[in-house]
Amino acid sequence: MPPGVRIRRRQLQTAVRHFRHRRDGRRITLVATIHCALPVYFTELKHLICQIEQTGAAVYCEGLDRFVGPPEPDPTPAEQQILDRWNQQDADNADRRAQRHGYVTQRHLLDHPSWRNVDLPARGMVRLVGLDDMRQWLDDHRTAAAEDPHAELASQVSDLTFWREMASRRRRIQRRVAAREHPRLYARRRQIILERLHAQAVDQDIVAVNGCGHHWAMCADLRAHGYRQTGVSWHTARPFPSFLEQIRLLQQLNVARQSQADRPITNPATASTAGQSEGSA
């Protein structure tokens, strides 16, 4: 299956694939995105999407209701607490990664009033996963960042590993990447936009903007419904370090953690007693 992202000449790039139905001629464009990248990347994608929209195509995009638009009706107090934590942690993590490299997040640039949000509402995401599982997921991510003194370096290594795997053409690795999200949540979100694509009138062209993790499965679905790919373009999202630079970064993390492990642990009670003894002497 074609991935929605690739690494070429030390650049992380995402795909825009164009499809046309064999019988009725309907056109669908799949825009794969990453959510934290160079400003010019989002500007370029937005210009391309708006050009296609001007020909009469409708634009469907995922996830924007978590950050813009009116609040969802009738959340329970427990659900609202989870939603607030989720939005805050997600925004903080994305902004921290963006500031580290001078990137921006997708929600700041890749949006337009005429685009239609087609996704599982945030409250629906919480209900699908369950309150307890969502709390555990948020706690795990917060605790990992708070307790690891090398969290920043570890985050960089994890980020590079993730994109290496995301760019793989092996289905086994693609499935492993997809499994990092809740499996029901990941599949349901993709199902919603595909259902909308196929329910739309055949004379209506569509641009679908989704995270690149959904791309290979959406391409397979379109082919199964009689679409053939007519073109593809690749768009640079951000620089990507060489394999040697990645190894050096991993070595730095290993050395830092080994130094932390080798550091003698001081018992506060013992240290306090020792201090008192020295004072008495």
Image (cartoon, helix red, strand yellow):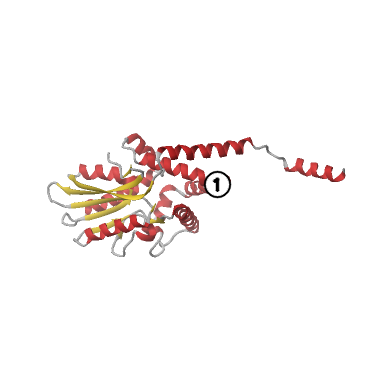
Along the viewing direction, whichever of 84 and 161 lies nearer the viewer: 161
Answer with left or right where residue 270 lies relative to residue 260: right
Q: Which residue is mark 1?
A: 143
Quarter of the N terminus within the rendering:
top left
Q: Residue 141 appears at what percent x and percent y?
A: 50, 47
Answer with left or right where residue 234 lies relative to residue 77: left
Can the viewer see residue 33? Answer: no
Along the viewing direction, whichever of 245 and 60 lies nearer the viewer: 245
Q: Residue 15 appears at what percent x and percent y?
A: 28, 47
- How many numbered markers are drawn? 1
Q: Quadrant of residue 256?
A: top right
Quarter of the C terminus within the rendering:
top right
The vertical placement of 201 against 143, above or below, is: below
Answer with left or right where residue 71 lies relative to residue 23: right
Q: Residue 258 appears at what percent x and percent y?
A: 58, 36
Amino acid type, residue under disc 1 in the picture: Thr
Mark 1, secondary structure of its residue: helix
Q: Seen from this angle, which residue lies furthest right? A: 281
* Residue lying at 29% horizontally and 42% vertically, measured from the top left: 216
* Residue lying at 43% horizontally and 61% vertically, measured from the top left: 74
Q: Residue 211 appears at what percent x and percent y?
A: 34, 49
The vertical placement of 118 against 156, above or below, is: below
Q: Quadrant of residue 160?
A: top left
Can the viewer see residue 142? Answer: yes
Label 1 packing within 10 angstroms: few (<14), some (14-19), many (20+): few
The vertical placement of 92 against 221, above or below, is: below
